[in-house]
Amino acid sequence: MTSTQSLFPETYESSRERFRGYLSTIKKMWNKAELHQHVMSFDNELSIDWIYSEATEKNERILVFTTGEHGVEGYVGSAMMHMFIENHMPKLDPRTTGILLVHAINPWGMKNHRRGNKDNIDLNRTFMLDPQFDPSFNPAYDKLDAFLNPKGTLTSIFYNNLTYLFRLGWHITTMGTRDFRLALLLGQYRNQQGLYYGGKEMPEETRVIMDLYKTALRDYEQILHLDMHTGYGPRYQMSLVNSALDKGSSDYFEKRFNYPLVVAATADEFYAIRGDMIDYIYGLQQRDFPNKRLFATSFEFGTLGDTYYGLFQSPRVMVHENRAYWHGAVNENVRAEAKRGFEELFNPSASNWKEKAVKDAEQAFKGILKAEGYI
Ligand SMILES: [Zn+2]
């Protein structure tokens, strides 16, 4: 058994090294398993790594496990991957089950502890069935642009928190909470330095991952996809976030998986976004592979909580970090403070948080694998 603390890697490189080392373990069950790498075009030290194997006898179903779409969230993702490989993978049946494990979809973001890729692109705004990187999409974002993306050096965090709260109150009063959150999270394709930027064209990372999903849907009758994220939802209860394209209700899935918290990614239950990766795989299945059985979900390990306070703390932390990144900070203390807040949002340090996160993931892995017929 690995201790909880040691599940969580310190660096991108050590996480990748550990991941590559899984190949020999996996080969004991899937003798045809191979390690693949896509070396990033802009930096040959960075790569998207995955281990893939077909079933050893008949390709009936595949388990897809992905981490690090939002770079910095890859540390928690890596911990969950490790636990999955140690405790749950050995229960799968390699004769009929294929396996696709992806380490750090966004390696630059993981290495540099940012959410976006090197072009500030939030990859979870880029997975579109019919790719449209339309700069005029989500016009309401313009109302929030100056609030979310203030220019100029980050001075005192205290002073900027006050400004943030004041402006937040004003925007919520004028727009209403629902419209505010929608404009905030939906995605935008025009401010290259802004939060939730989706880019001008399909990023390299997205292209690589889309090809993997197409292969999985093409070659297997049943696909189960588990994707790891951090940052939203209650601090001590991981949320399973389903696609709005899955017709099952959240209540239904809570019973089915024997898991206490399932939400759907709609404006009412969670949030609606364009270019969501899980929506993409559902869209692809419904359009091109309607007879295949698919269940895909995100594990969202909450950190700041889902109270009114928590909901609006996450953008605050992201605003400061993004500002310091583009415009610098007045001194090293302020820069470090902005970065620390950001790190606590997406890669928290507390050991009791880590322990509960692991426990929740264990319960969800068990419930989902059983309900979907994988164990
Ligand atoms: Zn995420």
Image (tube, rainbow, N blue to C red):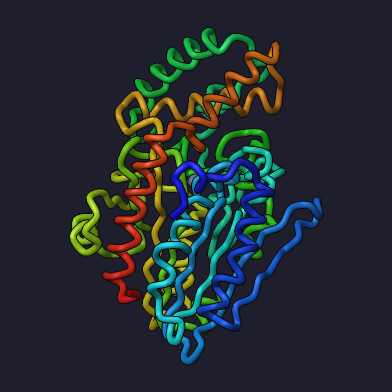
Q: Residue at x 63, y 45 (%)?
A: 110
Of 78 and 221, nearer the camera is 78
Establish if 232 lies above or below 53: above
Residue 253 image point, x, y percent = 24, 60
Q: Is residue 14 visible?
A: yes
Asked where in the image residue 257 lies, by quadrant, the reply is bottom left
* Quarter of the image where one finds residue 290: bottom left
Give the left or right position of residue 270, taking residue 166 as reference. Answer: left
| Residue pictured at 62% horizontal, 51% vertical | 15
Most extreme residue toward the bottom, as rendered?
57
User: Left or right: 370 with respect to 74?
Assistant: left
Image location (x, y in percent) of residue 350? 44, 31
Indicate left or right for 20 with 227 as reference: right
Q: Is residue 202 visible?
A: no
For the C terminus, which image quadrant? bottom left
If the image is split into quadrants, where does the N terminus sit? bottom left
138 relative to 214, above or below: above
Residue at 65% of width from left, 65% of height from top? 208
Near-viewer residue (278 or 233):
233
Q: Which residue: 36% across, 51% down?
A: 265
Relative to 58, is 251 above or below? Answer: above
Q: Is residue 46 left or right of residue 114?
A: right
Q: Nearer the viewer, residue 14 or 161?
A: 14
Q: Looking at the rendering, which quadrant does residue 305 occupy?
A: top left
